[in-house]
Image (tube, rainbow, N blue to C red):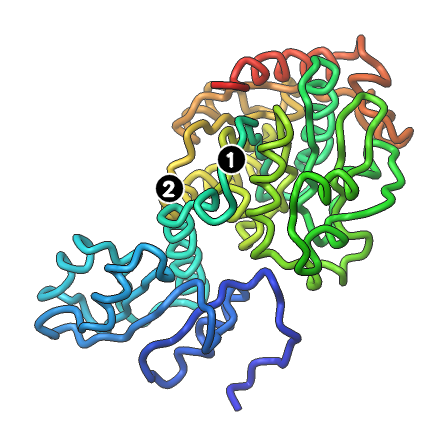
Amino acid sequence: MTGIPEHPPHPELIRVALMSDRAGLRELFERSGMVRVVDTVPDVLVWMLPHDADGLPSDVLAALADPGAPGVVVLSDRHPIRWFQEALRLGVDDVLCLPQTPQSLGMAAAKARAARARRVPAVAAEGPAGGGHVFTVFSTKGGSGRTVIASNLAVCFAQSGLRTLLLDLDLHSGDCALVLGLAPRATMLDLVGGSAPIDAEALGRAVTRHVSGADVLAAPARPEEEELVAVERLGQLVETARAGYDAVVVDAASAFSPTTLLALDHTDTLLLIGAPDVPAVRSVRIALETLELLELDLPDVRIVMNRAGADVGLDTADIEATLRREIAYALPSDRAVPLSVNRGRAVVADDPRSKAARSLLTVSRSLVATVGR
């Protein structure tokens, strides 16, 4: 017994196969909360190699030579001077020297899985993608206003004439439908919980139409239903949505979970949400560092400062200096926003003359210009 609590298999966990026997390694990976150690159909293969080995063994080389193989992580007790450069040259996704924290091992697995997704594009298995643009709205800090921003942008896009889908990927506690006052007849679980093909017809049956014309695919109705969602099928869902819509707005969960990483792999424009307070700015900085660590190579990352304008001792220049990035958009603090949420209406429709609505409309117009590029 390892002392790890017994949990039912969780579909969000990264599937890791340990190719070497090492006492305690399984426990370390599973304590990260990101990994499920498996024997079949892994996302990532992990080897433990001596630091003084003459080179990479044949089974590692075979995995690296196969573009459809899982990601590869190699561990060693000390810095592997003899084979480190060879590992990097041949495409090992990460090399770590033990000891490592469970979180570091989980992040290495996440990085390897993300790299594998780039090597094996979803379109190769799922057919040609359409020309839609995927906008992912993300924050690692709860209460950032992420869902309100995503929902209002989707409404703005639809009102501008774009075929728009709002995709709620906060599988545990997504509130997009609630914010827009919708009572969905189906949720994400109905579409990806089974094995039926995720095609345009199936997607059309699962969405709920908002009065603006935007379609909404709601998160599961109850938190425990998150575990029933087949996360490995979400990539197919995003690409089906891309083929059928001009704009897909993803409301991603507030963590670098496998679901969020999968969404980021399919993202064209990432909107990273912050606020003008020290914890929120720190959260954005850590998120930027994590994106760099994971080598996701996102083509377009834009920082959105929510509830901006308040005199709290942090101005735009201070925040940009801390982040070493420009703030693309600033959204003001406005009482109209919570009022609209409580009414189950998008603020851009509920109070279009409010400061928040006008700012969101300006942001949407800027983003609409990227669609079709």
Q: Identify which amino acid the numbered label 1 is placed on.
A: Ala
Left or right, 6 with respect to 265, comes to right
Q: Secondary structure at mark 2?
A: helix
Q: Position of residue 360 (x, y in %)?
A: 68, 17
Which residue is located at x 84 percent, y 15 percent? 351
- Which residue carries the number 1 mark? 129
Is residue 285 visible in the rendered image? The answer is yes
Q: Residues within 10 Å of mark 1 (few under 14, many from 20)?
A: some
Instruction: Using the image, tell me which numbered label, if any, was put on residue 292.
Output: 2
In the picture, residue 99 is in which quadrant?
bottom left
N-term mark: 1 or 2: 1
Q: Position of residue 372 (x, y in %)?
A: 52, 19
Which residue occupies the foreground of this view, 158 or 109? 158
Q: Position of residue 192 (x, y in %)?
A: 68, 54
Q: Which mark is nearer the camera, 1 or 2?
A: 1
Which residue occupies the foreground of this view, 225 or 283? 225
User: Height in image: 358 above or below 239?
Assistant: above
Which residue is located at x 12 percent, y 69 percent? 55
Is residue 175 visible in the rendered image? The answer is no
Q: Residues within 10 Å of mark 2 (few under 14, many from 20)?
A: few
User: Height in image: 20 above or below 328?
Assistant: below
Instruction: Using the image, tell me which numbered label, if any, was put on residue 150.
Output: none
Which residue is located at x 73 percent, y 17 percent? 356
Residue at the bottom extreme, as displayed: 1
